[in-house]
Image (cartoon, coloured by chain):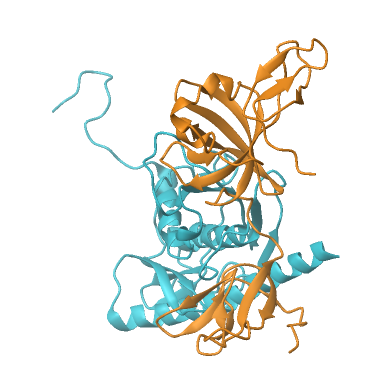
Amino acid sequence: MAGKGGATPATYSPSPTTDKQKPALFKEDWVRPDGRGFHQCRPAFFRTGAVNAASGSAYAEFGNTKVIVSVFGPRESKKAMMYSDIGRLNCNVSFTTFATPVRGQGSDHNEYSAMLHKALEGGIILESFPKTTVDVFALVLESSGSDLPVVISCASLALADAGIMMYDLVASVSVSSFSKNLVIDPVLEEENCQDGSLMITCMPSRYEITQLTVTGEWSSPKINEGMQLCLDACAKLAKIMRSCLKEAASDSKE
Amino acid sequence: MEEGKEAVMVTPGEVLGRSSDVKAGRGAYTALHNNTVYASLTGFRRTIPPPPDSPDQRPTVEVTGHKAHGPVPQPGSVVIARVTKVMARSASADIMCVGAKSAREKFTGIIRQQDVRATEIDKVDMHLSFHPGDIVKALVLSLGDARAYFLSTAKNELGVVSAESIAGETMVPVSWTEMQCPLTGQIEQRKVAKASS
């Protein structure tokens, strides 16, 4: 198996930047990098109507994670598409090159677009816009942990801002597990060293879950605890989202 | 009976009432699994009292769009479209306005030979009814196929509203089949809409 002199090595070893050594911090009684409690979420900031060209848009900031979502539609589907008597949803999530600490290295999350689609389609009344398409474009300006949950919540606000009929607002929160502890709304450093993650997207007013994603090893009691944490956090998040919508609506009325 | 004068703002997913008490109007929907009426848009909640002679005496609750999405052609709505292509048996048109609102992006519509007018529909010559560039007022018949909405101009008040002559001037309607260029006096054939007086 010896390669020819100077050729690429026969074995592969990961590059040093993906070093997953847990720092000694993440042991028994460690403090989170930003001083939050284990079950405390970052303060959320939402603003709708950020993009004038779009039918609806929203901007969200959770700590350092910054996301902007634009919604276009309902507009004509591409001619190549087959006729459909319910509406279509088309999602795209992209990262700016400056989103991650290392330039360009955060852009390998191609599955986020499909996950955003699955999270949102349960909440939209597709029958209200037959034959047409609603396009959702999410751009992550700064990625600092918990990106997909923030993108989902922000996209739901943008859809409400665009006037698309929905069953309910969609809120999303994720929880990381570290051997014995559960930590809600992880930041980037916590996500890199986690043992497992649980992300829940739910419609709080109807108490229904549209998407549940679990990675890693979880025992039943842990999953129950994680789910309960997430659902409580989603309910609080939905309150903030609703007040943001109402504020924006009454601002534009004046 | 007081019409809801509460300027209560609601957001999607907020409970508007039980389905035994109220009916869901525009901007609201009924969830069958727990018989509750929820809002589906952001806007002001309004209650409309039921008509006195209907069997169902529940008031209708609706959410009047603080913001509604851009207009989408619905069957039965009158649209303004610009003709893009005229072929032997149909004409393609880009729908630009739905009702009184202009669409943010155009939708494609098609006017078939049998939908141009109400009489002698098999003897219609498309080139004597429309020219590319004409502005027509049409009625949406149906959602159509994947490519286009089906439009109809088979009414007196539907048809070409504004057209340019070969000389380049906006023409004046003369009858329901003819328009005249004010510059050259030439008469051109169109399916003209009856102007509303």
**In-front residue for pair A178/B108:** B108
Residue drawn at (40%, 52%) of the image: A85
* Residue A7 image position (x, y, % from top left): 26, 21
Q: Of all residues shown, which one is farthest toward the left?
A: A1
Q: State the orange chain.
A: B
Residue A124 visible at all: yes
Q: State the cyan chain.
A: A
**In-front residue for pair A223/B9:** B9
Residue drawn at (50%, 46%) of the image: B141
Does residue A105 lie above or below B75 as drawn? Answer: above
Residue A169 located left or right of residue A119 = right
Does residue A40 lie above or below B119 as drawn? Answer: below
Specify the quadrant of the image occupied by residue A225: bottom left
Q: Of all residues shown, which one is farthest toward the right?
A: A254
* Residue A173 image position (x, y, % from top left): 50, 69
Residue drawn at (58%, 42%) of the image: A96
* Residue A68 image position (x, y, % from top left): 62, 52
Q: Of all residues shown, which one is farthest toward the front?
A: B120
* Residue A26 image position (x, y, % from top left): 46, 69
Residue drawn at (13%, 28%) of the image: A1
Does residue B160 lie above or below B52 as drawn? Answer: above
Q: Say which quadrant the C terminus of chain B sits in.
A: top right
Q: Say which quadrant the N terminus of chain B sits in.
A: bottom right
Residue A9 located left or right of residue A47 = left
